[in-house]
Amino acid sequence: MPISRIDRDTTSRKGALEQQLAEVHRGGARILIGTQMLAKGHHFPDVTLVALLDVDGALFSADFRSAERFAQLYTQVAGRAGRAGKQGEVVLQTHHPEHPLLQTLLYKGYDDFAEQALAERRTHLMMQLPPWTSHVIVRAEDHNNQHAPLFLQQLRNLILASPLADDKLWVLGPVPALAPKRGGRWRWQILLQHPSRVRLQHIINGTLALINTIPDSRKVKWVLDVDPIEG
């Protein structure tokens, strides 16, 4: 049975994606294997079965938004499996079918899932999560895995010892980033959390001034990420 693989690697050449999609619509490929690209904006009238693999990676990720992104993907593919009057089916691969968020998504729908996820973020361990609080990540990179954590530790100490700190500010880290090495650079980060977005903006401005006082800031590549999408 003809198989087509659609992802960034196979569609990097100009016109490659259009060529593969045309082949699919001609019936030349009966099984499609790929990434989330397949779920975004493409119409496959003959697709009646969709499988999402390893959804546990999203349900138990260190990135608290992963479950939300999985739920959005599931909702998208569920709408694309079975069109033109054909019955559709979505299969999920998981070792934890009893997961509360997964149960809510499957049997009550996305709206109930979103309400439950919001409630969990409000009572998450010892700290609330967005949208109940605001986040800023200061991320630093270097080639030898030494200067970045040292720079961030110095920055953390300066923030906590400055008038910027109050009893509602959390500064967590430094810790390795979720993708700890990228492009030959080691990546570390600290997280700043505060319930007041206005107050956090003031803290951001002060943090930028503090960074300029740290000699190691010249030895690293750093970025300040407000409302980070990835950890």
Image: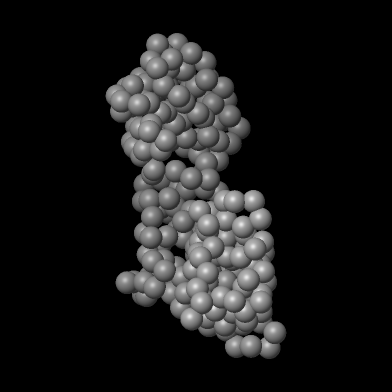
Tell me if I can see residue 188 in this picture.
no
Which residue is rendered at x = 48% and y = 45% of the image? 230
Is 166 placed above or below 25 here?
above
Quarter containing the C terminus:
top left
Foreground of the two, 170 or 144: 144
Q: Position of residue 165 (x, y in %)?
A: 45, 25
Which residue is rendered at x = 50% and y = 39% of the image? 135
Foreground of the two, 217 or 227: 217
Q: Position of residue 193 (x, y in %)?
A: 47, 37
Relative to 51, 226 lies left or right: right
Q: Position of residue 124 (x, y in %)?
A: 40, 53
Is 85 placed above or below 215 here?
below
Residue lying at the far right of the rendered structure: 84
Tell me if I can see residue 143 in this picture.
yes
Which residue is rendered at x = 45% and y = 47% of the image? 128
Which residue is rendered at x = 56% and y = 22% of the image? 205
Relative to 31, 152 lies left or right: left
